[in-house]
Amino acid sequence: MVKLKFRYNDVMEFIEKDQIRLFDSEFSLHHKNLYSGKGKGSDFTGWVDLPSKTGNDLLSRIEEDARKIAEQSQVVVVTGIGGSYLGARAVIEALSGPFDGLLEQPEKKSPLVLYAGHHMDEDYQFHLMQLLDQKDYSVIVISKSGTTTEPAIAFRLLKSHLEGKYGDEEASSRVYAITDASKGALKKLADEKNYATYVIPDDVGGRYSVLTPVGLLPIAAAGISIRKLIEGAQNMEKFLKEKSELSENPAGLYAVLRNILYQKGKTIEILAGYNPSLHYFIEWWKQLYGESEGKEGKGIFPAGVGFTTDLHSMGQYIQDGLRNLFETVINIEAPRNKVEVPHDPDNLDGLNYLKEKRISYVNAMASKATMLAHVDGGVPNMEIVLPEINEETLGEMVYFFEMGCALSGYILDVNPFDQPGVEAYKKNMFALLEKPGFEKESEAIKKRLR
Ligand code: PA5
């Protein structure tokens, strides 16, 4: 039985119950097509049965490399962008303490995970290299195409730094490349330098790749159980496959409800969390849904907020602004650690009414209160409830959102597995940078900028 619960009572005052039933047969068709590889973009549906196909050999090899990284390194630099970065960071940050890098934890064997290649900020890169001068480190470099500019620049710097610090041979033993089986510059480099290499399956696109080595190696290197993560995803995979009726399939209901709301002019979905550790999970979700659905002049715009922090910044707009919003809220039933509000004999702050209450209780009340207020303010709310944030529930939630996204894209009648729009800026950027092969575009773009 899966642990994730999907609730949508607070949407029902915005739609008719019959509207959901109208999608029964469409859902069945898309559900069937996803498993039989007959829908749009079916070359990229390898993620559908990926959890159940993940074998012990792969997991053992990843665990072995994670152990080697931990033995050799205080820091591991995960180098990638978009789908080659966000999934790993989502899981690692959800399960790490916020001050792990600063705490003295002699019992902790795993290295601190840092990130590179997810932007082109020169100052960031400078500070990273400054830190790496002082730390023993390894690098996990991830790029399916093997040609993406941001990670390629970052890796060029890291490779040169590693070789300078450790010499060529040891430097090579500290690099793990995750890329295409046969093509791209990273594959060529990995072969030449004899890096340990993992393959990203051909039929799994970047934003659906967190449960491949793309996510699994960094997650294992961070000391997190990839077996439990995969187990959670397997449970959700099995559950959603068996539920071929829309009324029983939570990912299907999520997909259908967001499309009904979209048709009613709710064009922005806000994914809200009440735990800062979910910040990067929300970032991962934004990419998954934005890149999968925003095309052909269509698609719900995925936004994210972290409550209660953002209730003090975005709360006003959500409560009272343009009514084109709906929210999906991730609520966690129990924290992994216990902190209570202490009794204070002076009670100058008037908080004794909360004495000995858990902080999580106050947080949960804030969540319930906000949900009611937002629904009253015209913002439909859906809810994802997890008993706790752990490897298993995160595995479930990753798969739930992947399946929800694919089904939602099919209902919207787009290919949820391509991303033609991301090439437009790259062409201009390469022209401006005078990349060989872009001479004609270079002339044209310079005229536009004059
Ligand atoms: O989901 C996607 O396809 C993208 O976000 C890619 O993952 C991202 O652009 C990085 O691409 P690559 O892995 O080829 O470097």
Image: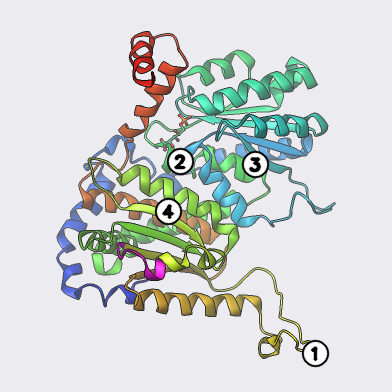
Distance (Cα) linking label 3 and label 1: 53 Å
Instruction: Look at the picture and state if 140 lies above or below 328.
Output: above
The single residue placed furthest to the front in the displayed view is 450
Q: Is mark 2 within 8 Å of ligand 1?
A: yes
Pointer 2: what residue? 209
Q: Quadrant of ligand 1?
A: top left
Which circle, 2 or 3, is nearer the viewer? 2
Q: Which residues are magenta?
A: 318-324
Mark 3, residues whose alpha carbon is within 10 Å: few (<14), some, or many (≥20)?
many
Residue 63: image tag: 3
Q: Earlier in the sequence, mark 4 or mark 2?
A: 2
Mark 1, residues whose alpha carbon is within 10 Å: few (<14), some, or many (≥20)?
few
Give me the residue at 50% from left, 27% from top: 179
Under mark 3, the amino acid is: Glu
Which circle, 2 or 1, is nearer the viewer? 1
Q: Looking at the rendering, in which quadrant would you find the C terminus?
A: top left
Residue 346: image tag: 1
Under mark 2, the amino acid is: Ser
Distance (Cα) linking label 4 and label 3: 22 Å
Q: Quadrant of residue 45?
A: top left
Q: Secondary structure at mark 3?
A: helix
Distance (Cα) linking label 4 and label 2: 11 Å
